[in-house]
Amino acid sequence: MEMSYLTKPIRRELLQKEIARVTNHGKQESEAPLSPINTPAVSGWNMSELLDRLDDDRDFLCDLLRVFREDSQTNVQRAKKALAEGDLAGVARAAHTLKGMLRSLSMNRAAEKASELENASRQEKGEEAESLLAQLAQALAELSPEVDAQLAEVKA
């Protein structure tokens, strides 16, 4: 019997495919292969990963995205204000909050920018933090149309 290995985190689709392969006892699968589930959008938002974690609950996704829209802008404004006041610890706190929010929503590119901003702020690298905050704001702006599209899709 051929052995396979599934990496963590285990994805439902891959597990189902492996179970089907094993239970077919070597017979040819009649289904088309599954499409890749971790193909991030241009903005770095891995919707497949997020929906998998939410068990494809689109209503819950909408609730999360509504909260995200408001809270992300609030935290960007906090970071900008803190940066203007020279409060790099305040920038780090806002970046940390954004990083967690973005990672939980599988918005990986923006989460990485938030992480870089948090680190630069903690290391008191003000100029780098200023540049990274602008990059983070741009990454969030790029996500905005996708968030709006997801919200509109669920309403339809």
Image (spheres, rainbow, N blue to C red):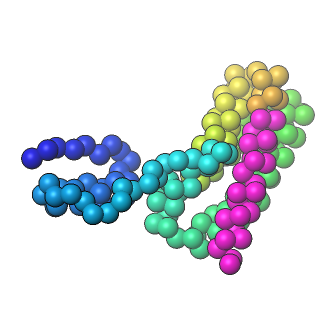
Q: Report the front residue among 108 and 22.
A: 22
Against 50, is 138 above or below? above
- Magenta residues, dominant SS class: helix
Where 38 sits versus 23, above or below? above
- The residue lying toward the viewer, choosing from 10 and 14, is 14
State whether residue 129 is above or below residue 99.
Answer: above
Residue at image coords 79%, 41%: 138
Q: Which of 45 and 61 is in front in this view?
A: 45
Q: Does the magenta stretch include residue 79?
A: no
Image location of residue 155, percent across then percent down: 68, 77
Residue 47 visible within the image: yes
Relative depth, front residue between 116 and 2: 2
- Note whether residue 96 is visible: no
Instruction: Please provide the residue range marked out in magenta.
Output: 133-156
Task: Point out the residue furthest to the left here.
Answer: 1
**Quadrant of the frame with the C terminus:** bottom right
Q: Residue at x 67, y 42 (%)?
A: 110
